[in-house]
């Protein structure tokens, strides 16, 4: 696909906003803040191999007991600063913070949106030069405008998302987002600091050839998941070839993006060390589910759409299965037969 140099993400956002009469431009400003923070982070990530002071662990664990990388902290600060500076959201919840942050001042309290964010996804890969990402979602607040935000503003089911997206810092940096009318992808040109529309109206193939799961946990998966993985590994009798190929990076955004473009299924089921799966409903699963569905794919967690799960706590984890429609349909049948 050739990059259409004539449409920048900024222009695209303004044009999309013009399609919604009465739009106040607040959502556009949020997306601009995210765009700015992602450029700063992209720059920092690109030089990570040279600048040893930004690599490695801070020697502390985050609120979920996971090792915090220096770039986790940098990414968290960068996004929160960009979002708080513009008076366009009233609060933010981040995977790296124990609770949400209320931007409690006159300007921000009048804003109507909140943002949830995984500032640096796949951060354990940063030291080995493997793609990492950022995942975000935007919701309308439930509490009254003019007051400080409350927990209920952040615990809304994925169906209530106004926008979601991710940035992948890979062989190139890309921003992919949806506001509920399709999915569009933009590739960053670092020489001039601009994202250009490179992947308009992204659609995930209905059937794919890839399955992505941490197979090291195979023995700990429930029988239905083991059965499905064995199916993926089995031979297609008409071609004498394995049905699907395995691809697993261990950076959710990168695994998701590859499957979105090529077609495939991503699974993070429960296992012994993670009885509810490892991935977080609010920061990872719901935003990617919104994108998958908007691209014609599906995202489920055991017996329901990820988008329908009301979070009961900020850092809640859920089993996560996302990808090509027919592959998820098939997995869903196997999961149902086990119940
Ligand atoms: P994060 O870096 O935001 O904590 O997320 C890590 C996640 C995700 O990116 C990845 O897909 C998954 O952890 C990999 O987990 P395993 O190492 O258990 O496969
Ligand atoms: Mn993550
Ligand atoms: Mn993270």
Image (cartoon, rainbow, N blue to C red):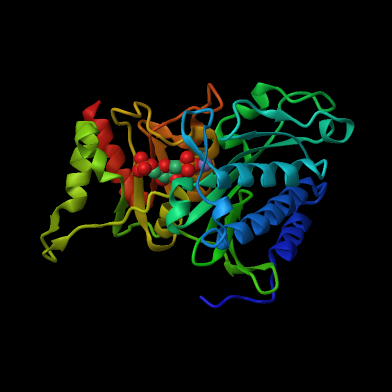
Can residue 294 be seen at all in this image of the molecule?
no
The one nearer the camera, 68 or 169, is: 68
The image quarter containing residue 216 is: top left
Count of numbered tags: 0
Q: Position of residue 21 (x, y in %)?
A: 80, 51
Residue 167 sits in quarter: bottom right
Instruction: Name above or below for residue 192 compared with residue 159.
Output: below
Q: Is residue 87 visible?
A: yes
216 horizontally vs 6: left or right? left
Task: Please tell me which residue is depicted at 27% across the width and 32% down the height of the picture.
Answer: 336
Q: Is residue 268 left or right of residue 307?
A: left
Residue at the extreme front of the image, as rendered: 53
Q: Could you say which is closer to the camera, residue 3 or residue 99?
A: 99
The quarter holding residue 96 reads top right
List x then y, in percent, for residue 5.
66, 76
Q: Who's the residue at 42% across and 31% down the image? A: 318
Q: Quadrant of ligand 1?
A: top left
Q: Position of residue 261 (x, y in %)?
A: 43, 62
Vertical order, 168 against 62 (above or below): below
Residue 268 at x, y percent in the picture: 35, 40
Position of 29 relative to 159 (above/below): below
Picture quarter with the C terminus:
top left
């Amino acid at each position: 696909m050739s990059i259409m140099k004539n449409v920048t993400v900024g222009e695209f956002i303004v044009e999309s906003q013009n399609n919604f009469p009465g739009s106040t431009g607040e959502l556009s400003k949020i997306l601009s803040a995210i765009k700015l923070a992602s450029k700063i982070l992209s720059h920092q990530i690109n030089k990570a191999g040279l600048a040893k002071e930004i690599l490695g662990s801070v020697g502390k664990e985050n609120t979920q007991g996971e090792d915090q990388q220096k770039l986790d902290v940098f990414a968290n600060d960068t996004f929160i600063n960009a979002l708080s500076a513009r008076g366009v959201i009233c609060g933010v919840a981040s995977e790296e913070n124990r609770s949400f942050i209320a931007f409690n001042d006159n300007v921000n309290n009048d804003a109507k949106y909140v943002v949830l964010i995984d500032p640096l996804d796949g951060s354990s890969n940063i030291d080995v030069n493997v793609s990492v990402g950022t995942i975000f979602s935007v919701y309308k607040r439930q509490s009254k405008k003019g007051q400080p935000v409350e927990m209920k503003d952040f615990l809304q089911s994925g169906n209530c998302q106004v926008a979601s997206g991710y940035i992948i810092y890979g062989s190139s940096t890309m921003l992919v987002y949806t506001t509920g009318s399709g999915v569009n992808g933009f590739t960053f040109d670092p020489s001039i600091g601009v994202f250009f529309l490179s992947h308009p109206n992204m659609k995930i193939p209905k059937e794919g050839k890839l399955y992505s799961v941490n197979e090291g946990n195979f023995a700990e998966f429930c029988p239905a998941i083991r059965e499905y993985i064995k199916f993926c590994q089995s031979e297609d009798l008409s071609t004498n070839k394995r049905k699907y190929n395995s691809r697993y990076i261990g950076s959710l955004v990168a695994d998701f993006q590859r499957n979105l473009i090529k077609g495939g299924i991503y699974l993070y089921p429960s296992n012994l060390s993670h009885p509810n799966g490892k991935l977080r409903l609010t920061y990872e699963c719901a935003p990617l589910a919104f994108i998958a569905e908007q691209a014609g794919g599906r995202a489920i967690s055991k017996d329901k759409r990820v988008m329908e799960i009301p979070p009961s706590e900020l850092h809640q984890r859920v089993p996560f299965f996302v990808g090509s429609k027919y592959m998820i349909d098939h997995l869903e049948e196997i999961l149902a037969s086990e119940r």
